[in-house]
Structure formats: structure tokens, C-alpha cells
Image: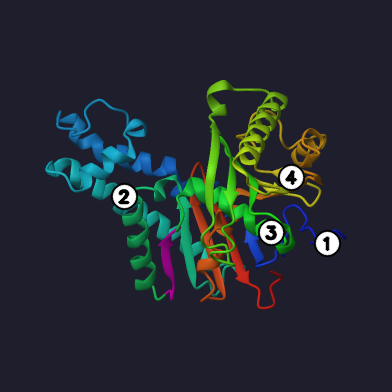
Amino acid sequence: MADETNTGIAAHGASRLPWVEIDSFNLELKDEEEFLGDRASKGAFRETLETWRKPLRKSGEDPFGKERSEDVSKKELDAALGGDDPDASVVVHSAVEDFAQELAQVTRRFLNTRAWDKTERIVVGGGLRDSRLGELAIARAEILLKADNFKLEMLPIHCHPDDAGLIGALYLAPSWIFEAHDSILAVDIGGTNIRCGVVETRRKKAPDLSKACVWKFELWRHADDEPSRENAVKRLVKMLKGLIAKAEDEGFKLAPFIGIACPGVIKSDGSIEKGAQNLPGNWESSRFNLPASLVEAIPKIGENDTVVIMHNDGVVQGLSEVPFMQDVKSWGVLTIGTGLGNARFTNRNGRER
């Protein structure tokens, strides 16, 4: 498969990008009939928390009362970790330990695959990372792996996970995109939310884009509205057009580029082979192509023809780490969400900037 078109733009779902080679993404490892990633997902942590609450609930001493485990906020759980209630603290610490054990076990399986061999560092993103309990689980998993003689660092992703899914889109674009522009549009599509943002490159402050930030974003929780696929695309287009207008009013030099992070296996033509089952409607249909739909709806940004590039959401979140991974050769990302997103990268020596 060709990774670049004759216009110098990487293909959708490309394995070769300006800064990195993508050795693997969306790897689905199974243990009997179960996907291993499900054992280190957001839901798996909540199930573990429920397991540790049950003995206390039977005796009427559950520190979280009647609140369902899936509804206890990360803020409440973080407070319990260092709070004055020993029962609450022990319950959360126990859940963190069990989850860290599962995360370490799943990570071992990734590291034992050919694609993940000799991985030097793994960053962990996703919603759980944005909490003290998530940071403890990541640190504990790293210690467990080192105890098994894996020479590996395991760290929380630098950016807030919500921002990482947008900032990473910068690394889908070729460098010439930035020569006359200071920002791009980015889209992060998930099973619950669609987030769109204007990402400032801040390239003058840092040519490696390490100072990039999300200037403004819009969030739509589509899971609440249960829209059709067509209505979801219309809403996405409306959000993007609103951001274009705001960026122009603010004086940004917006690039004619939209980078999209989307669940699943993304084919070079922009269609989705599999993995989009949690999105509204059938996004895996051969008759549906999101990048083409967006180009049709937004043919130009400023005076230039719009270019849209789409890649797997785990890949894009991982790409936000590119400037912080230049001291290693091979690294990976795990994103803890509905499942366990994953991607493995090798830095390019003669990268095209």
C-alpha cells in the first residue's frame, strides 16, 4: 500500500508518517474467547472496584453507600485514596492494585509480540490516566514489569487525554502544511463523544511542536442523542464550520487541513474496515467515507482546498508524544477507555519535517 499520494499527503491509516513508522496499531490479542484489552479497560477497573465493595456492603459498611461503582467519580476515588476513611482508602487501593496487575499482564502480552519487541517506553492515555488512581496504577504496572526483567518505562501521557487526541493530529500532516499557517482543525471521535478543536502549532516557540495546544474546542456527547450516521456527520460539519469562523475572527492562519482520530482499522481510502461498532450508525459500510463527506461539506478552508487525513484514535493520541520520545527508538501507547487502544512506533532517523 502506498503511504503517500502524489500530493505529498500521507494516506489515511498510513504506516509511514513524517516523524514515525507505525509498527502496529489496534492489535487485538485474545485469551481464549476474551479480548485481553477488555481486562485493562475503564469498565474493568469499575468491576474491580465493585468486587472490593461487596464484602463491606454486606455488612452495611460500604464507604461509597448506595452509589453504583460505575457512577463513583474519579474525583471521589482520588479523595478516598488519601482520605481519613480507612475503609474507603483500602477499597480504592485494592482496586488500583488489581487493575495494575491486569494492566501489567496485558502489557506483557503486547511486549511478547513481534511488533512490540524491544519497546523502550510506553505512555498510557485514556480517561483513567487523568486521575491520581490512574497514575498509581501506571506506576505500579511499571514496577511489576521491571520485576519481570522488562527494561521499560511506563508513564502517563504528557497532555490531558482529551487534548492529546486533538494535538496528535498535527503529526499526521506534512511539514509544508505549517509553513504559512499556525493552526489546524482536529477531530477526535469516540463511542460517547465527538470533540473538535483548533490546535495551535506554536511552531515558532518549538519547531518539534512540543508547545502545541488546543486553543478552543467543542464537545458533543452523541451517545445521549443517539443520532443517525447522517445526522452525526451534519453535526460534526456544523461544529467544524463554527470553529473555522471563530479561528478566522481571532486572526489565526488556519491550515487547509483536518486531522481525524477515529476508532477502528482505517483503510487507505478513508473507509473503516472494523472496530467502529460503538459509533452512531454503520460507519463500516463500504458506501460511507467520512473524509470524503467532510471535503464535500467543507471544500475550502480560507482560499485553499481542504485536505482531510484520518487515522486510528489510539495512534493519534500516541502521536501527541512524538516530541517527548526523541531519546528512544521504539515506543508505544496504551489508551484505557471502552477497550484498550494501542499503537507501537519507531522514530524515523531521516524524518521529513
* Residue type indicated by callout 3: Phe
* Residue type indicated by callout 1: Ala
Q: Secondary structure at mark 1?
A: loop
- At 70% from the left edge and 27% from the top edge, which residue is drawn? 234
Q: In the depicted view, which residue is nearer to us: 37 or 242? A: 242
Q: Secondary structure at mark 4?
A: strand
Q: Which is in the foreground here, disc 3 or disc 1? A: 3
* Residue type indicated by callout 4: Glu
Mark 4 or mark 2: which comes first in sequence? 2
User: Which residue was labeled with disc 1?
Assistant: 2
Mark 3 or mark 4: which comes first in sequence? 3
User: Which residue was labeled with disc 4?
Assistant: 273
Residue 287 screen position, x and y as percent: 82, 34
Residue 231 screen position, x and y as percent: 69, 24
Q: Which is in the foreground here, disc 1 or disc 4? A: 1
The residues tagged by marks 3 and 2 sit, at their Cα atoms, a distance apart of 38 Å
| Quarter of the image with the N terminus in it | bottom right
- At 40% from the left edge and 47% from the top edge, which residue is drawn? 128
